[in-house]
Amino acid sequence: MLTNVERPRLSATHVYAWGVHLYTGMGLVVAGAITYVLVSSDPLRFRDAFLLMAIGIVIDATDGWFARRVRVKEVLPGFDGRRLDDLVDFLNYTCLPLLLIYQADLLPEQQSGWLLVPLLASAYGFCQVSAKTEDGFFLGFPSYWNLVAFYLYAMQPPVWATVALLLTFSALTFVPARYLYPTQPGSLNRLSTVLGTVWGALLVAIVWNWGDHPGSSPGARQLVSLSMFYPVYYMAVSWAMSVRYWMRRPRGGQAISNR
């Protein structure tokens, strides 16, 4: 005899949790759109790619807040949202920015093999169990290759400088320095978020007025130089906190906090 088996009901909480995962997954849609514009012949493809990357950053910066509010780990323990997030981030923060550098001819064809170095370094960084520390930092350079690509494209440095920057940031992936994680709690992270929001708005304004090339917008190079305030702040504070951590560790291994 067949018996009716009661199926588990899909509660509103489950719907919200799946909605958060879908929101994170929209980063893959953004990645697809970036790929499409980068391989197109549209003269505005690089401008559009950077604007789409900005949308991807907004999704990445906010999905964690939604996930914590809905408690997705408790509601959907069988689905790993962090793994989905890592897949999206590896595409949008590493693979596609490096593709943009290649498509924009920021390296000569015979020098394009250097792009494999940050690709492999980033893969190593993403696979590190301790890539995100318990006290609220990234460990090692956090694969901000989208921002590296932006400044390389905007400033158009000599080839030797481009290669040097790619190799330097790749090497920093293996150095266990602590980098600010602005979406985590803490007063310094809140300050970084405020400054980052201003900086992000400035970058969007710069890119929006680029046209088919950064040099086509009057004063673009000056604005790009002005926007360097945030990367300089971010790197300086991150390394200052790392040095502080390293100096404290031998005297008892105390963890520092950005709170």
Image (spheres, rainbow, N blue to C red):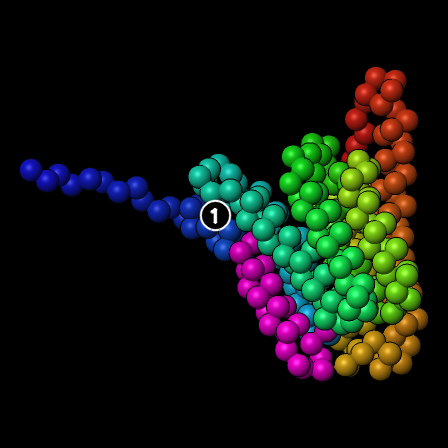
> Residue sitting at 79 percent across and 32 percent down?
257
Range of the magenta residues? 24-46
Residue sitting at 82 percent across and 44 percent down? Answer: 172
Which part of the image, by quadrant, shows the N terminus?
A: top left
The quadrant of the image that shows the C terminus is top right
Q: Is residue 101 above or below residue 42?
A: above
- Was residue 43 drawn as part of the magenta stretch in this picture? yes
Along the viewing direction, whichever of 237 and 107 lies nearer the viewer: 107
Q: Is residue 122 above or below residue 23?
A: above
Give left or right: position of 61 versus 104. Answer: left
Disc 1 packing (10 Å; few <14; some 14–19; many ≥20) = many
| Position in image of residue 225 (x %, y %) | 91, 65
| Residue 114 point in image, percent of width and height | 78, 57
Which quadrant would residue 38 be assigned to in this image?
bottom right
Q: How many marks?
A: 1
Residue 205 shows up from this direction:
no
Which residue lies under the disc numbered 1? 17
Question: Residue 251's image quarter?
Answer: top right
Query: Measuring 88% from the left and 40% from the top, which residue is drawn there?
Result: 239
**Which image quadrant is residue 158 in?**
bottom right
Please state the horizontal and vertical placement of residue 48, each as a whole percent of the image: 69, 74
At a point 72% along the width and 71% down the height, the residue shown is 103
Mark 1 residue element: helix
- Of all residues, the one furthest to the top in this rendering is 252
Q: Residue furthest left?
A: 1
For the stretch drawn in magenta, what is the main secondary structure? Answer: helix
| In this picture, residue 31 sits left or right of residue 18 | right
Left or right of 192, for residue 61: left
Residue 35 seen in the figure: yes
**Residue 87 on the magenta segment:** no
The amino acid type found where label 1 is placed reads: Ala
Image location of residue 136, percent across then percent down: 73, 37
